[in-house]
Image (tube, helix red, strand yellow):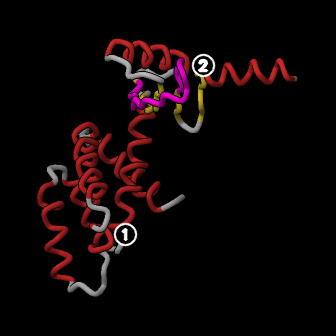
Amino acid sequence: MTVAKRYSKALFEVLVENEELESGYEELKQIRLVFQDNPQLSSVLTNATLAESERKSLIAPFIEGATSKYVKNLIQMTFDYGRINYLVSIINQFEILYNEKNHTIHADVITAVAIDDAQEKRLADEFGKRVGAEKVILNSKVDEDILGGVIMKSAGKIFDGSLQTKLNQIRRTLLG
């Protein structure tokens, strides 16, 4: 089991046990966002050329800002053990556990033209029924090259209902 999986599983279990799953997850998403918006941050926090006191002063706002003592402990522990560079991976693994518990999946939806909220909701509902998820969080993208239809990507699987793919299938059949 990887470091990220071990840490995330332990944190997940303790947050569930202490009925802090939702609030803890929200905190973790905010922390992940800061690290993703500042990709050099984890490198700086593990940089041995900086004095320990300087690195501690950089991590202190994260620890002090966390409302969950378990999230605080995670940040402190990853910092103390020189594993802060795993923090985003830990949060990503945590999100997988969270989504499994809540029967939630994330999917990319690619269309030739932008879709409105009602169309997005209909797609999410239908896709959720198809894959057995209670909630589908869509990330919509426009790609005019698909001509029409929809491509859905989720959990390494692609559901391709694009017009371009259908035309290619017809072409292969005719040239067969």
- The kind of secondary structure element at disc 2 is helix
* Residue pointed to by mark 1: 83
Q: Residue furthest right?
A: 176
Mark nearest the camera among 2 and 1 is 2
User: Is 52 colored magenta in this rendering?
Assistant: no
Q: What amino acid is found at the position of numbered circle 2 in the picture?
A: Leu
* Residue pointed to by mark 2: 163
Q: Position of residue 87 (x, y in %)?
A: 35, 60
Residue 73 lies in quadrant: bottom left
Look at the numbered discs 2 and 1 and tell me whether their residues touch, using CB distance below 8 Å: no
Q: Position of residue 147 (x, y in %)?
A: 54, 22
User: Residue at the location (47% across, 24% down)?
Assistant: 111
110 lies left or right of 23: right
Q: Position of residue 70 (x, y in %)?
A: 24, 53
- The kind of secondary structure element at disc 1 is loop
Q: Residues within 10 Å of mark 2 (few under 14, many from 20)?
A: some
Q: Is residue 39 above or below residue 58?
A: above
Magenta highlight range: 136-151
| Mark positioned earlier in the residue sequence (2 or 1) | 1
